Amino acid sequence: MTLHPQIIEKDGKKEFVVLPYEEFIVIKYELENYEDLKDLRDAKESSKHEESIPLSEVIKDLDLK
């Protein structure tokens, strides 16, 4: 993705960045995906020593209810 930022300076120092709205939306979407992936990896890591249940068993349990 190519960004088209507009840099706004204050007292000769870079202070703000303005992006086209479409680029902002793409960046927001990508950051949300990154956060979801990070949360998934953290959950997977924290539960790696827990006993797992095969999917076939879960399906059987759901069918009974």
Image: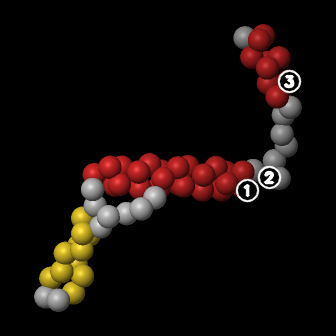
Q: How many marks?
A: 3
Are there few (<14), some (14-19), or many (20+) residues within 10 Å of tag 2?
Answer: few
- State the residue in front, 23 or 33: 23
Q: Quadrant of residue 11?
A: bottom left
Mark 2 secondary-structure assignment: loop
What's the image's color scheme?
A: secondary structure
As drawn, is 24 to the left or to the right of 10? Answer: right
Are there few (<14), some (14-19), or many (20+) residues within 10 Å of tag 1?
Answer: few
Amino acid, disc 1: Glu
Q: In the drawing, what numbered circle is on residue 45? A: 1
Q: Residue at x 28, y 61 (%)?
A: 19
Q: In the drawing, what numbered circle is on residue 56? A: 3
Which numbered disc, 2 or 3, marks the residue that appears first in the sequence?
2
What is the C-alpha distance between the residues marked 3 and 1? 23 Å
Circle 1/circle 2 CB separation < 8 Å: yes
Q: In the drawing, what numbered circle is on residue 19? A: none
What is the C-alpha distance between the residues marked 1 and 2? 5 Å
What is the C-alpha distance between the residues marked 2 and 3? 20 Å
Image: 60 above or below 1? above
In this figure, which residue is indicated by the disc labeled 2? 48
As drawn, is 19 to the left or to the right of 57? Answer: left
Mark 3 secondary-structure assignment: helix
Q: Residue at x 44, y 49 (%)?
A: 29
Tell me residue 1's x, y (percent). Answer: 46, 58
Q: Residue at x 35, y 54 (%)?
A: 23
Are there few (<14), some (14-19), or many (20+) residues within 10 Å of tag 3?
Answer: few
